[in-house]
Image (cartoon, grey):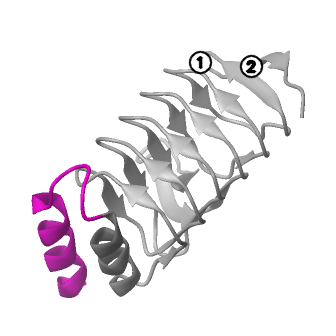
Amino acid sequence: MIADFFIQLLFKTLPDSRLYKFKSFLLRKRGFNIGENVRVISSAKFKIKQFSISDNTFIGHDFFAAGSLDSIIKIGKNCDIAPRVAILAGTHDIGDYNQRAGHGKGSLISIGDGTWIGGCSVILPGVSIGKGVIIAAGSVVIEDIPDNTLVAGNPAKIKKRLSK
């Protein structure tokens, strides 16, 4: 836990668009599964324990990944995640009227190979995003997205089927 704090502290002091291999090294030291040629901008924040990024994926400015101890986030290869994207893998059971946010629980979020997530989008717990998906900027993804589709809106809805 303390090591995670110091790694994140060091991580955010590095130049935004340089030292990608060193940043990948630091993320691996946190226990994350990081592929080859992963490029993460220094302002990215990871408040999660189980996280993986596959080869040739880019993570933009002010990215935020969060979840509970049993949450898992998996990002495929050749993905592009724009600035200010939030992936939130933790949620709560619905409690009684005294406290609606009941017992906390984690979920799995998976993002398929070749996906492009537009800026300021939010991916909510338990969502599976297929391969070759485009999520338009500002979208809020609350349900699974099939392969090769373009989605937009709040909540995100399929706008177009994309060719392979």
Q: Please state, as top left, top right, bottom left or bottom right, where the C terminus lies in the image.
A: top right
The residue sitting at 53% across, 50% down in the picture is 95
Q: Please state, as top left, top right, bottom left or bottom right, where the N terminus lies in the image.
A: bottom left
Side of 39 where 36 appears, left or right: right
The residue sitting at 40% across, 81% down in the picture is 28
Side of 30 where 163 appears, left or right: right
What residue sits right under mark 2 in the picture? 157
Q: Position of residue 60 (x, y in %)?
A: 37, 43
Q: Secondary structure at mark 2?
A: strand
Q: Is residue 77 above or below residue 143?
A: below
Count of numbered circles in the view: 2
Q: Is residue 12 magenta?
A: yes
Magenta segment boundaries in residue numbering: 1-19
| Mark 2 residue type | Lys
| Mark 1 residue type | Asn
The residue sitting at 49% across, 62% down in the picture is 104
Q: Position of residue 14 (x, y in %)?
A: 14, 61
Q: Is residue 10 magenta?
A: yes
User: Within 10 Å of the Cα at label 2, are there few (<14), some (14-19), or many (20+) other Cα atoms?
Assistant: some
Which disc is residue 154 wearing?
1
The residue sitting at 73% across, 51% down in the picture is 112
Q: Position of residue 155 (x, y in %)?
A: 64, 21
Q: Secondary structure at mark 1?
A: loop
